[in-house]
């Protein structure tokens, strides 16, 4: 059973804006799922509905088998949420605010657990500091500590690294991997492709309130990935030889590099044919390497395709 | 599922403690302010004016104003504490945590309203203690006195909670206490018996719900009331029910809490 199953979920705000249309999505236990999409695509609305902050217009959401409406207590108990905005109680201390969160989820105080979390997030030395004295990055850490205070089985990270420095970003990625080791499911939204590429097992692309694609990251990259073969020529070329016009070739590096773009999905990549052709044309090369297109290229390609269809 | 029917008491405790924390953090101000204002009232109304006013219903004027003074603070403090308590997380955005936690509306209300009522009761008791420094106190029905104190604090904290949910700016937060509650309290017989008014204004006063609160509370002190004690109790209970109804409606519809 998936830890989160969403079916036919729609949301239209009172303003008339439809943020989500007929979303169907299943998130598997223990995976890291990245919800990727441009700003305003509906990522936060989706998360906020699952967490109980926004009311759905229609559809059902089950968290660990519990309906988020009828059985909200059981559903929410397993969820930790790190919101996008840095919202903290200015006058509270770090330790108090984290203990407060644990209490809200109906759990008894556990000093040991809280200490472990604060240490893992480099907050232990700041435990008695008031939140208003902390930097933005530190506040972000506090929000993560609050979300982890009640030992959630599912962690939602809404734009976790927006406006965050490199150190925290790396800490966060490490933390997410540790959580997965412990069997925690992590769902993150982002519009940074590298974040999804770095962390996710599966990626869902959301656009204008619709999920247009859900795929294993590796499969997605394989499936949609275009690869380039770059040949470093011994002698520069002025133009691509006419004999090789059938291949998708381009010259780079002042004619010293021949770039061949091919599709990894194709049954024949054409590499053998190209190399034979080059040999026949007397073109010699002294080195070669391949490059795989990044998730960003894939994403941009997907969104562009969508636009063309629309 | 049985878990769904058990109360999440740790959550109620957490909210309650969190809210009381603010009171204790500013304890100097929270406690000193009512002491100073009570002292001022006694200087002005008790000593300066009171010495020229004859006893009301056989009660010396300085003593007569004690229940009204307590009520005045109880009403304004309950409303401002409770409205600020729930408005601030909405304003700051920290409400997300309450909304996404496994807490029922009843538990949220218990935590916030319980804390607001506790604070105003504490302040009421501080005023009572301060009064004892100026006049020899007399409480004929101490249990009823405590009963009215509790009932009023809870009712007006609920009312404040509703205002805190309704308000969409700091001005609105001040609007109801300033423009409605304070005038109603002053005109509700805090400093006089409404029987002292001409018949027309006496009749108008009976439309003021605060009259019933103060009258009942004063009865607990001196055994004398402007209106029948049962009517006082009934009106206060009615207002409690109205506020409960409003809070229930708000949570059921998610008004101003969820989009």
Image (spheres, coloured by chain):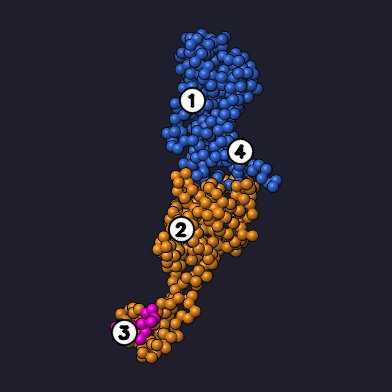
Q: Residue at position x 51%, y 43% from top?
A: B258
Residue A73 showing in the rendered view:
no
Shade of chain A as shown in the rendered figure: orange
Q: Residue at position x 53%, y 47% from top?
A: A57
Quarter the C terminus of chain A occupies: bottom left
Q: Main secondary structure of the magenta part?
A: loop
Residue range highlighted in magenta: A237-249
Give me the C-alpha separation between circle 2 and circle 1. 50 Å
Q: Which residue is mark 1?
A: B181
Give me the C-alpha separation between circle 2 and circle 3. 43 Å
Residue B166 showing in the rendered view:
yes
Q: Residues within 10 Å of mark 2 (few under 14, many from 20)?
A: many
Give me the C-alpha separation between circle 1 and circle 3. 88 Å
Rendered location of residue B92, percent (x, y): 47, 43
Earlier sequence position, callout 2 versus callout 3: 2
Determine the chain carrying the residue at label 1.
Answer: B
Have a look at marks 2 and 1 and say if they share a chain.
no
Give me the C-alpha separation between circle 2 and circle 4. 38 Å
Q: Which residue is mark 2?
A: A207
Kind of element beneath mark 2: strand
Kind of element beneath mark 4: helix
Determine the chain carrying the residue at label 4.
Answer: B
Q: Residues within 10 Å of mark 3 (few under 14, many from 20)?
A: some
Q: Residue at position x 50%, y 44% from top?
A: B259
Kind of element beneath mark 3: loop
Q: Which residue is mark 3?
A: A237
Rendered location of residue A93, percent (x, y): 52, 46
B57 on left or right of A231:
right
């Amino acid at each position: 059973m998936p830890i989160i199953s969403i079916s036919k979920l729609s949301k239209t705000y009172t303003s008339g804006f439809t943020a989500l249309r007929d979303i169907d999505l299943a998130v598997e236990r223990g995976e890291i799922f990245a919800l990727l999409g441009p700003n305003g695509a509906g990522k936060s609305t989706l998360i906020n509905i699952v967490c109980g902050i926004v009311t759905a217009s229609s559809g059902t959401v089950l968290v660990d088998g519990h309906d988020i409406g009828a059985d909200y207590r059981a559903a929410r108990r397993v969820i930790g949420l790190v919101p996008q905005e840095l919202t903290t109680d200015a006058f509270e201390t770090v330790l108090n605010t984290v203990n407060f969160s644990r209490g809200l989820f109906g759990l008894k105080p556990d000093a040991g657990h809280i200490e472990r979390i604060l240490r893992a997030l480099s907050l232990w030395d700041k435990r008695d500091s008031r939140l208003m004295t902390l930097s933005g990055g530190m506040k972000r850490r506090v929000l993560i500590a609050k979300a982890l205070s009640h030992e959630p089985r599912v962690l939602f990270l809404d734009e976790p690294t927006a406006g965050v420095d490199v150190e925290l970003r790396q800490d966060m990625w490490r933390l997410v991997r540790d959580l997965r080791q412990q069997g925690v499911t992590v769902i993150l939204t982002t519009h940074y492709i590298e974040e999804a590429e770095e962390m996710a097992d599966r990626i869902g692309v959301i656009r204008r309130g619709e999920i247009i694609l859900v795929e294993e990251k590796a499969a997605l990259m394989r499936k949609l990935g275009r690869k380039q073969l770059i040949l470093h020529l011994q002698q520069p070329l002025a133009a691509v030889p006419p004999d090789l016009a059938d291949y998708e070739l381009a010259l780079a590096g002042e004619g010293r590099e021949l770039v061949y773009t091919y599709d990894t999905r194709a049954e024949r990549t054409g590499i053998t044919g190209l190399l034979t052709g080059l040999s026949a044309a007397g073109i010699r090369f002294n080195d070669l390497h391949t490059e795989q297109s990044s998730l960003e290229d894939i994403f941009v390609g997907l969104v562009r395709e969508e636009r063309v269809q629309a | 599922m049985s878990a769904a029917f058990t109360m999440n008491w740790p959550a109620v405790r957490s909210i309650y403690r969190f809210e009381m924390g603010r009171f204790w953090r500013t304890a100097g101000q929270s406690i000193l302010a009512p002491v100073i204002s009570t002292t001022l009232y006694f200087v002005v109304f008790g000593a300066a004016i009171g010495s020229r006013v004859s006893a009301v219903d056989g009660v010396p004027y300085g003593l007569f104003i004690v229940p009204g003074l307590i009520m005045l603070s109880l009403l304004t403090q309950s409303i401002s504490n409770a409205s600020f308590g729930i408005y601030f997380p909405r304003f700051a955005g920290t409400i997300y945590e309450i909304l996404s936690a496994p807490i029922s509306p009843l538990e949220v209300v218990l935590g916030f309203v319980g804390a607001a009522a506790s604070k105003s009761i504490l302040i009421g008791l501080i005023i009572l203690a301060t009064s004892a420094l100026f006049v020899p106190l007399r409480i004929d029905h101490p249990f009823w006195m405590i009963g009215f104190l509790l009932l009023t604090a809870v009712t007006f904290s609920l009312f404040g909670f509703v205002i805190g949910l309704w308000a969409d700016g700091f001005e609105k937060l001040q609007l109801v206490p300033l423009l409605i509650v304070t005038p109603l309290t002053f005109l509700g017989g805090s400093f006089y018996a409404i029987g002292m008014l001409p018949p027309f204004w006496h009749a108008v006063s009976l439309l003021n719900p605060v009259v019933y609160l103060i009258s009942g509370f004063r009865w607990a002190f001196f055994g004398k009331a402007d209106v029948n004690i049962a009517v006082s109790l009934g009106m206060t209970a009615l207002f409690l029910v109205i506020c409960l109804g409003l809070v229930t409606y708000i949570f059921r519809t998610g008004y101003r809490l969820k989009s």
